[in-house]
Amino acid sequence: MSKIKISILFIIVLFSELTAQENLIINTYNRATKSLNGQWNYIVDPYENGFYNYRYEPFENQAEPGSGAFFLNSKPKDKTDLVEYDFDLTDSITVPSDWNTQKENLYYYEGTVWYKKSFNYVKTNQSNRVFVYFEAANYQSDVYFNGKKLGTHIGGFTPFNFEVTDLLKESDNFLVVKVDNKRKKEAVPTLNTDWFNYGGITRDVKLVETSANFIQDYFVQLNPANNQQIKGFVKLNGKEISEKEILISIPALKIKTKVITNKEGVATIEINSKKIKYWSTSDPYLYDVVFNVNGNELKDQIGFRTIKTSGQEIHLNDQKIFLKGISIHEESPIRGGRGYSVEDAQQLLNWAKELGCNYVRLAHYPHNEHMVRLADKMGMLVWEENPVYWTISWGNKDTYKNAENQLTEVINRDKNRASVIIWSMANETPTSEARNIFLTNLASHTRAIDPTRLISAALEQTDYQGNPGIRTIHDDFADVVDILSFNQYVGWYDGLPEKCGQISWKITQNKPVLISEFGAGAKVGLHGDKLTRWTEEFQEDVYVQTLKMLEGIEQLQGFSPWVLVDFKSPRRVLPKIQDGYNRKGLISEDGQKKKAFFVLKNFYDSKN
Ligand code: GCU
């Protein structure tokens, strides 16, 4: 099959899979936006009284929903009129942020909260279009604008947008969002996790104003098969998108080229250059890439690098690299609560840098976009993970669609980030036929929409042929991944630290191995002998013993110990020690470094 045919096939497959989230606007960072962050009015609605009538029928499905429907933001017409809520008389809450750490009476609240934001907005050009864009809201969001339903989004960690052009007024617009963070068996994640189920509009909300036909999406990365070729596509959104000319320039490479869209408004990109300065951890060089259609410009800062496996090695730009990592939860080290700001991301990545890391595992769900854009600038490699965690409803088709949807959204958002090298399908999931099919389908979907990155998952280790002294990975999904990763807790959940010296590893797969988790709990400032649990000395010893033990794994190419900072988890209730925190952090929630921090730092500083 000729090269042209292959590349058109590559784009068609790529494109057919990507249209799953066909209206997601990427790169809102460099677009004309108006922030809707700030104070919003809210109503706590545990009985979902503002959504269902007394017959438990959704108001939104009724022709005449009546004033009980909160999305109408109703006001009494006159003194006789009965309206039993009023957003403008309620308390306000800050967006973005979770509700749990803002309102004491909502600390453990799981259920529905209604948000309302009123605003005026005058378009800069009458022919322009306007979208409301949410970076994320946990977990299910039903979004209404000026009394009309815009749509529903499921998933707490990925972006979504809706068009409001035809509903927009110059003044007195009202945006109403029903956010429900109830945990459900068939959801993704499912009922039990080891992190705090923060609820709310947890990340930025903005209005995005575009021209009538605008650049909605693009994929501009190095061709994995030829590192002197930039390959991808650019996609227009609008009514006049067919056979349109799009100018693409990369000034620093003196590249100026034109591409023409097909009838779906998509143009393929193939740009050859022998002068590309490759993005790397030591030199995270980002190019300005400028798209121009009808005089409307959109810029992005993109790094070009290749990431591959070669036998048991991981190669960044064809150079072997050891991933010196740490696992991170998206909790604000500054305010507590769900992290969302540039400052939150900066603090976490600064600590990772200080630890000597060149890599971070963002667990167990997509973190905010600030994190990956900062990682691009700081030269920090990133593992991103889909929240398929522990025991998901593998046989449930909607659960699969939901998991695939969330994965597609994060890939869409971050596919132009050089720092992102690994897509993780799941964490600690029990092997079964249904689970293998579920994860294998996610992996092939991922490969179809992003053939430039590596696939993995945090698997679990087992005894080799029943011998507990020898550990191995016995998991069908290990044959599907590019990088074999697993969590292991020898010395904490499995024996005492000295047990590390009694364990050997027999990994049969000829693939690079990453230890996605190891670690131990310690209460900062608690000291004692190294056999006393919860002391810094015990945790320190687990690190010393584990680092020695892992040297025995021939295919070892890196790890991301659990975890950078102590984080909130309702599963952790030991008084005076945990008090609602998982204490496996190398840093306490108030920023104090534990002894083990320096064990790992010294190890990384000694490893080139
Ligand atoms: C698991 C899991 C983490 C959890 C950790 C722990 O491996 O992946 O989410 O927090 O172990 O038990 O501390």
Image: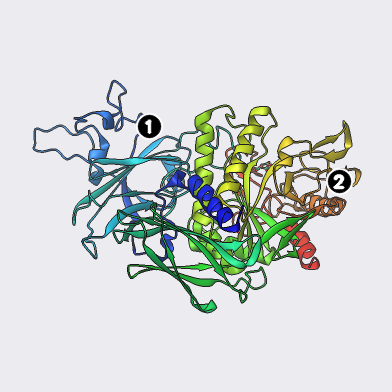
> Which colour scheme appears in the figure?
rainbow
Residue type at mark 1: give it: Pro
> What percent of the width, then of the height, locates residue 569?
59, 42
Q: Nearer the viewer, residue 50 or 447?
A: 447
User: In this picture, is 438 found above or below 241?
Assistant: above
- The residue at 29%/56% (across/down) is 130
Characterize the local packing of mark 1: few (<14), some (14-19) or many (20 or more) Cα atoms within 10 angstroms.
some
**Ligand 1 quadrant in view:** top right
Q: Is residue 380 left or right of residue 77?
A: right
> What percent of the width, then of the height, locates residue 245?
38, 65
Q: Is residue 550 left or right of residue 591?
A: right
Q: Is residue 117 left or right of residue 388?
A: left
Q: Nearer the viewer, residue 332 or 536?
A: 332
Characterize the local packing of mark 2: few (<14), some (14-19) or many (20 or more) Cα atoms within 10 angstroms.
many
> What percent of the width, then of the height, locates residue 79?
8, 36
Residue type at mark 2: give it: Cys
Tag 1 residue: 46
> What percent of the width, then of the height, locates residue 357?
69, 63
Q: Residue furthest top?
A: 55
Q: Quadrant of residue 141?
A: top left
Q: Secondary structure at mark 1?
A: loop
Residue 192 visible in this rendered orientation of the protein: yes
Tag 2 residue: 500
Picture mark count = 2
**Where, quadrant-wise, is the C terminus in this rendering?**
bottom right
User: In this picture, is 501 found above or below 33?
Assistant: above
What's the distance in space between the residues labelled 2 and 1, CA to CA? 48 Å
User: In this picture, is 117 found above or below 480?
Assistant: below
Q: Secondary structure at mark 2?
A: helix
Question: In terms of sequence position, does the residue under pointer 2 or pointer 1 come before the other?
Answer: 1
Marks 2,1: beta carbons within 8 A: no
